[in-house]
Image: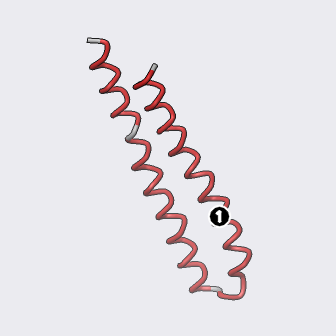
Amino acid sequence: MLQSAKIIGAGLATIGLAGAGVGIGTVFAALVNSTARNPSIKAQLFSYTILGFALTEAIGLFALMMAFLLLYS
């Protein structure tokens, strides 16, 4: 009973990875859109994009870490 609850909890915790994928897609879509509108600030926008990518990916990694903790603890 407890093992099946752990597996279900780990599966539910990985839903956060889908949100991270959508967030990363949104960040880079905004970069492409902004660069198309104003190409002269591409370098500044790219640094903000990398920061947004890192923060969004961190949320996904936290969700994956929680899934592993639920599964193997």
Disc 1: which residue: 50
Relative height, residue 70 to residue 51 (above, below):
above
User: Percent x, y for residue 67?
Assistant: 43, 32
At x 33%, y 34%, the residue is 11
Relative height, residue 72 to residue 39 (above, below):
above
User: Percent x, y for residue 73?
Assistant: 46, 19
Instruction: Name the foreground residue: 27 vs 10.
Output: 10
At x 71%, y 88%, the residue is 40
Is residue 8 toward the left or the right of residue 30 in the image?
Answer: left
Relative height, residue 49 to residue 7 (above, below):
below
Relative height, residue 42 to residue 7 (above, below):
below
Q: Quadrant of the N terminus?
A: top left
User: Secondary structure under badge 1?
Assistant: helix
User: Percent x, y for residue 28?
Assistant: 53, 69
The number of discs equals 1
At x 54%, y 64%, the residue is 27
Instruction: Name the foreground residue: 71 vs 55.
Output: 71
User: Percent x, y for residue 38?
Assistant: 65, 86
State the image quarter where residue 70 is shown: top left
Tell me the amino acid under the disc marked 1: Ile
State the image quarter where residue 39 is shown: bottom right
Residue sitting at the far front: 72
At x 39%, y 39%, the residue is 14
Instruction: Name the foreground residue: 1 vs 15.
Output: 1
What's the coloring here? secondary structure
Please rate how many residues cluster around mark 1, counting C-alpha atoms within 10 Å: few if below 14, some from 14 to 19, many from 20: some
Is residue 55 toward the left or the right of residue 69 in the image?
Answer: right
